[in-house]
Amino acid sequence: MSNEDYLKDISEIKNLMNKSSRFISLSGLSGVLAGIYALIGAAVAYWLVDTYSDGKLYIFHGWVFWTCMSILLLVALLSALTGIILTTRKAKKNNEKIWDSSSRRLLFNFLIPLLVGGVYCFIILNQGRYGQTGGLMLIFYGLALVSASKYSIGDIKYLGYIQIILGLIASYYPGYGFWLWVIGFGIMHIVYGTWMHFKYDRR
């Protein structure tokens, strides 16, 4: 066998190992749609707060607060459902199992930081410290992405790093938390999802 044959065999073995230990059928298009959902939700929430809270974005009270929380949950739900549908479709196209040991590890490592962050954000909101929630959401979401990247496409860790950095900036400048949230969950999802779509989905 020539050196080229050996290199080809090694490459095939590496690909098989990656498929057995990583879930690689994440859809880039789902990231784009999640970003669009986030931008629409942020626009509606901004209008509500700006209209009914004397133009002060950081003041949440009564039905305005709960409506904004409902919008946030709706954005998260739509993003999750879209991700599941598109990822399932891509996995079938790639003849990859949607639910196996690699996808279970991916989900577990993604959900632990995310659920902990969600509970902590709820505690912060319940204490009336609204200015910190945008930064905390970005930080815990970024940690979830970095944690999950070990069991999926490694590139998602870079999106995680960006979210963490944006979250830290938002924590230092809480008055800009909303806009940094829009950048992180909206714009960065669209940019990163588009890049992932053309790099992986169009093969």
Image (spheres, rainbow, N blue to C red):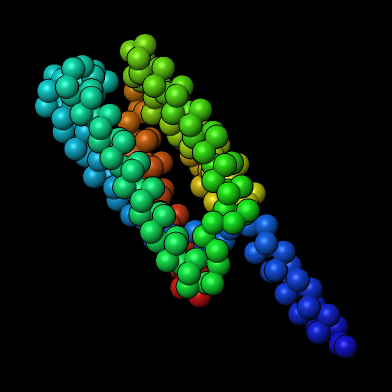
Q: Residue at x 35, y 41 (%)?
A: 76
Left/right of residue 33 with respect to residue 41 in the rendered view: right
Q: Residue at x 35, y 18 (%)?
A: 125
> Residue 104 in the image: x percent, y percent?
58, 49
Left/right of residue 23 with respect to residue 79 in the rendered view: right
- Tally the marks: 0
Left/right of residue 146 with respect to residue 127 in the rendered view: right
- Looking at this rendering, what residue extends furthest in the top direction? 127
- Looking at this rendering, what residue extends furthest in the bottom direction? 1
Q: Is residue 42 visible?
A: no
Q: Residue at x 25, y 32 (%)?
A: 70
Q: Say which of 23 and 4 sits in front.
A: 23
> Where 65 sits versus 144, above or below?
above
> Residue 30 in the image: x percent, y percent?
39, 56
The quarter of the displayed image where residue 15 is located: bottom right
Q: Quadrant of the N terminus?
A: bottom right
> Residue 145 in the image: x percent, y percent?
54, 43
> Where 154 sits versus 75, above or below?
below
Q: Residue at x 21, y 39 (%)?
A: 43
> Residue 28 in the image: x percent, y percent?
44, 60
Q: Say which of 2 and 170 sits in front.
A: 2
Q: Is residue 84 visible?
A: yes
- Looking at this rendering, what residue extends furthest in the right direction? 1
